[in-house]
Structure formats: structure tokens, C-alpha cells
Image: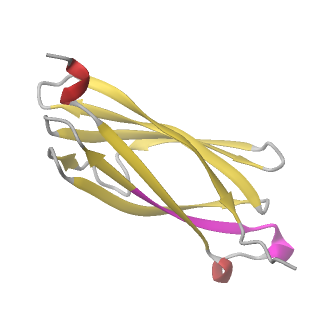
Amino acid sequence: MDNFVHYRIQVAVKVRYLAEQSGEDDNRFVFAYTITVSNEGTQAVKLISRHWIITDANQHVQEVKGKGVVGEQPTINPGQSFEYTSGTVLATQVGTMSGSYRMALEDGAEFSVPVPQFVLSIPRVLH
């Protein structure tokens, strides 16, 4: 049996600009992102750590590593999802995030789940 089927993890991201917490005059642009991690495989997985690379329009890079997400290390059973919201602050109106999650299986085996790059951007005013 193909091992890949045992752990098929999908990651979906939604981004919101938080104008009320941001200050253009201070070059402070606050974004919230909601991430849904779905287990489409056949084994339970535990999200044990995260690694983010956050880049603003000035090419300033922040690297964030840590245990779990939002203070949790959730176990996600087959067919279930875990959703959480977190945030980041940029010095520019636009930036990107990408990274990965480290997952563990019940037998202790670990694997990495890439999170493809997504854009953080203030809403544009159309003329």
C-alpha cells in the first residue's frame, strides 16, 4: 500500500487585513490569517511544530519557528480538520508567507507538510 495515502494533508488559508489595528503613518500593517488543516489520509496526525517565512515588500524576512500552533499541538483524525486564526505585522502594505508544518503519526514517524506561499495585502481602492 502506498504510504502517501496514509497521510494526505490539505492546507487552506484565508487572509484578512486588520485596518483597525494597523497604522499607515507608523508603517504597521496587521494581517490575520485563518488556516484549515484537513486530514484526508487514513491515520491520525499530530501537528507538532510550525515554520514560517514572512517577507515584506522591502524583502525583510522574518522566520518563525515554534511548537504547535496557537499554543496547541492538535491531533487531527482521518476525515477531520483543525482551524485556527493567527496574525502577523508587516512594515509594508504587501508581503508573503510560506512555510511548513511538522506532523507526527501515532507510531512516532514524522513528516513535513509544505504550506505554499500566500499573499498578505491591504485591500486596493479601485478608481
- Asked which colour scheme the image uses, the reply is secondary structure
Q: Indicate left or right for 110 with 29 as reference.
A: left
- Please state which of residues 33 and 25 is positioned toward the viewer in this rendering: 33
Q: Position of residue 33 (x, y in %)?
A: 51, 62
Q: Position of residue 53 (x, y in %)?
A: 60, 40
User: Residue shown at 15%/39% (left/top)?
Assistant: 44
Q: Position of residue 72 (x, y in %)?
A: 29, 53
Question: Quadrant location of residue 35?
Answer: bottom left
Residue 122 figure quarter: bottom right
Q: How many marks?
A: 0
> Residue 38 location in percent, x, y?
29, 48
Q: Going by the picture, which residue comes out furthest to the bottom?
A: 20
The relative height of residue 51 versus residue 92 in the rendered view (above or below) is above
As for residue 23 lying within the magenta part, the answer is: no
Q: Is residue 18 above or below residue 5?
A: below
Q: Is residue 68 left or right of residue 77?
A: right
Left or right of 87? Residue 57 is right
Q: Is residue 37 visible?
A: yes
**In the figure, 49 relative to 2: above or below?**
below
Query: Which residue of the protein is positioned furthest toward the front in this rendering?
Result: 127
The stretch in magenta equals 24-35
Residue drawn at the location 52% of the way across and 38% of the way down: 99
Q: Quadrant of residue 78?
A: top left
Residue drawn at x 88%, y 80% as measured from the top left = 127
For this rendering, which residue is in front, 36 or 75? 36
Residue 52 shows up from this direction: no
Q: Quadrant of the N terminus?
A: top left
